[in-house]
Image: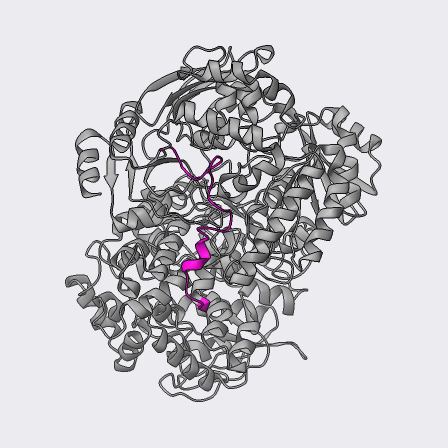
Amino acid sequence: MRDLERTLRAELRGEVDFGAAARALVTMDASNYRRVPVGVVAPRDADDVAAALHVCAEAGVPVVPRGGGTSIAGQATGTGVVLDLTRHMNGLLSVDPAARTAVVQPGLVLDRLRDAVRPYGLTFGPDPSTHARCTLGGMIGNNACGAHSVAWGTTADNVTELAVTTYAGRAHRIGTGWAGAPDGLRELVGAHLGLLRTGLPPRFSRRISGYGGLDALLPERGVRLAQAFCGSEGTLGVVTEAVVRLVELPPAPALAVLGYADESAAADAAAGLLPYRPLTVEGMAEDLLGTAGGGLGRARGVDGAGGAGRASAPAALPRGRAWLFVEMPDEGAARAVVRGADALDALVVTDPAGQRALWRIREDAAGTATRTPDGRMAWPGWEDCAVPPARLGAYLREFRALLAAHGLRGTPYGHFGEGCVHVRIDFDLASAAGVARFRTFSEELADLVVAHGGSLSGEHGDGQARAELLPKMYGADVVRLFGAYKDVWDPAGGMNPGMLVRPARLDENLRFAVLPATPFAGEVARCVGVAKCRTAAPPGGTGASGAPGGSGVMCPSYRVTGEEQHSTRGRARLLHEMLAGEVVTGGWRSEEVAEALDLCLGCKGCLSDCPVGVDMASYKSEFLHHHWAGRIRPLAHYTLGGLPAWLRLIARLRAAGAVNAAARLLPVPGLARERALPELAKRPFTRDASAVTGRAGAAAPSGPADTAGGGPAGAAGGPPGAAREGAAAVTLWPDTFTEYLAPEVGHAALRVLRAAGLDVSVPRGGGRVCCGLTYLSTGRLDRARKVLRRTLDTLGEVPGPVTVLEPSCAAALRADLPALLPGDPRAARLAAGVRTVAETLEEYAPDWLPPRLDRPVAGQTHCHQHAVLGDAADRRLRERAGLVGEPVGGCCGLAGNFGFEPGHHEVSVACAEEQLLPSLRAAPAGALVQADGFSCRTQIAQLGGVRARHLVELLADGLAGGPAARAAEGAPDTQP
């Protein structure tokens, strides 16, 4: 392999990487399978592809081309050299709007093509749910379809020419006719005309399995070589360029949503809608929506954070337990479908935002369906089999019965208008008995699909998952013809061996077999590789609130670097291989994993934006905990990781002024020199909290609260706030940032909560009450547990909700606290009581009217709030206060300690430049800038030169006596 690597480096201009990290990143795709390659090559152009194939053929090393790595049957994995066609060969070479064609390279992401041709009123018809990250080359390899293929066909129907390079490095240009065909192909077809005409199952739109398009080579079908090549799954050659057909984009499509009594009724109805010439006919049942991370609640307008709240558009799905989404070219056609459909209930959605909200649930199903309604993981393997549409209802009834007979659970959904069903099933793929059941079920399901005249694959290809079963569908003679077809193109058998013909067994190479039986391994394995993290822009995220349509967060460092190892999926793959110990051999001391996780900002965006809820921030903490066990850590882990203790010590010594002066003159060891440190407050929040929490009109207590002690929870000096009789008791959490760095936020919160009539108390012992966030982010888990236990001891029993101002601290208390202390019932009680200010006001002072500010507002939703807490209540509060404008998504890039650590400054700034800083520059004159996180406010101040404020500060300003109120009365605003 060293000789092969040297030769490839000498012959190619692109990158050649045989290192452990590069190999580990491509051992898996989005399937159940894992194959370990010898190296990865990123060719720069077709000449590089030819050179790589020639070198590998000379060495007898197989090759597999790879695009976005979202294949679900194992065909994007390989044991030889993996060609990464996304790094360089990702261009849109030309567009001809008049001819409605485009010339593309194989690594071009579908959405880039669609965005480029949209100004011409055109699009590429096939649109898999992975359209934001799948590549045209991968779509050609799998003959991908998507929701709109009922109108515009499969990828094969939309490809006119292909440039292909075979294993030995020979180039072919194929289209219609025999020009460019490999030697012997014409003779092979001529010798098997009868078998091609009568031996294949009856053609229907989703007969994708095997080389199912081979009958396109019949003379009566025009000898369409390019069409027949589609769906070959990298087993014949490498596509280096394609001419694709474009279709007209309807200017104002409308969505008819039809409700049915059950799944079978919806399936039976789907075929009857085809005469209306729909663009899509998608089906799903209630059990899918129940697994979609609160998807049913989102679709029905429930915000998920505070119960039923502001409904999104549309406010509700129609009545029923199953639905068809029927997209039509315009509203009139959609209403005609509603009139003609025999549905329980229906609605027509014309609003684009409302349509996107519904489609997002459907598109995320590939990931969300990996959880059954009872929380168990479900896996691909039978993701996309298809039957003729008229048979779909009967097939689904028998399919459900087969699942039950094997004690399995799955949630079907998919392209009902074409009879294509997606489903993930809760196979046990880790035990011998479970794998045996997987095989038995697969064989019986293949028989069922064939009995209904169907195809084992309806759009994603067979790969390793189903190729072994192709004789059931096609018979021995056709399968032998498939083998001969491959041999004409690839006589040496070097292109993606083990796929389609002479395949590996469906129960070989399972990715779970190499993992230890530990909870952490189970968490890492939940990444199924759908690669929503690999998008050029943040994926549309519903966030913890469930409110659809907002910009997501995941994965900011990937969008800056473009490197797979910095995506959530890439990091999960490296952790998987670390646990397997075959490719990444360093265990918890692995430098490959440490390097990949170094640029993880801990934003937790993946927790909400990843369809399967991968929590890379938590995985990073666990890794760092083990990685540095028994060793001297980086200095930043002690300075930034121990920040609460350092700040508490400085406050005790009353040395904030001296520390601020020193920080302006001297660099702090272990921190990035490009960063100025935020100034410490002269007086901690709880030292002055009593002066603000006294009753209205009452004199402040004579002395400050004792913040150094560790007494039980209670008012920090003075009587409780001016609460109305019987008002709820609210505890205001003195987080480290509010306590020592931004006490003005705490004072503003006390003013607002008091104005709302709540009975507010602040725990004594500022600094001893801590969420452990900085210890979590640096992987000091034992220290975090100790701090959290001390916090629980200090607090005692806390009456009512705990209002936390810093979103990252609130997220740590709500999610990380019970995970770190699962056996302590106090942890669960505190986590359940955590509220944001907006949630507190909405739940405990619902009749309070906030001051009207009537100003535009710019800023960013904190990434932890988006991922863990939700911001639906905040949005409603801003609306009631007259704050106009939507916060942007993404991450500020400072992310607590991340932006202060050496080597992170460039990435930190680039993250801020993605969305946050441009939104501030584009804000209207006079706009307020809101950022509830201290890191976000610091980043905005340092990079944007703007003072951002917490929502409670904006509201406090509007209260009587505040600057906003004085401005409304014509009085001068003397506050800086």
Regarding residue 11, the answer to whether it shows in the image is: yes
Asked if residue 235 lies in the magenta stretch, the reply is no
877 displayed left or right of 175: right
Q: Is residue 826 left or right of residue 571?
A: right
Where residue 118 sits: x, y (%)? 52, 24
Instruction: Say above or below: 376 vs 829.
Output: above
Residue drawn at (75%, 36%) of the image: 391
Above or below residue 637? Residue 652 is below
Asked whether residue 456 is in view, the answer is: no
| Residue at x 59%, y 57% (from the top left corner) | 437
Looking at the image, which residue sits at the far left?
A: 666
Q: How is the image coloured?
A: one colour
| Residue found at x 45% / y 29% | 136
Q: Nearer the viewer, residue 10 or 480?
A: 480
The segment highlighted magenta reads 494-519
Up the image or down, 839 lies above or below 688; here it is above
Q: Is residue 810 above or below residue 550?
A: below
- Residue 947 at x, y = what percent? 37, 53
**Magenta stretch, overall SS:** loop
**How many numbered dots are placed on residues in this image?**
0
Q: Is residue 726 left or right of residue 975?
A: right
Say which residue appears at 50% left-offset and 51% top-offset: 507
Specify whether residue 516 is painted magenta: yes
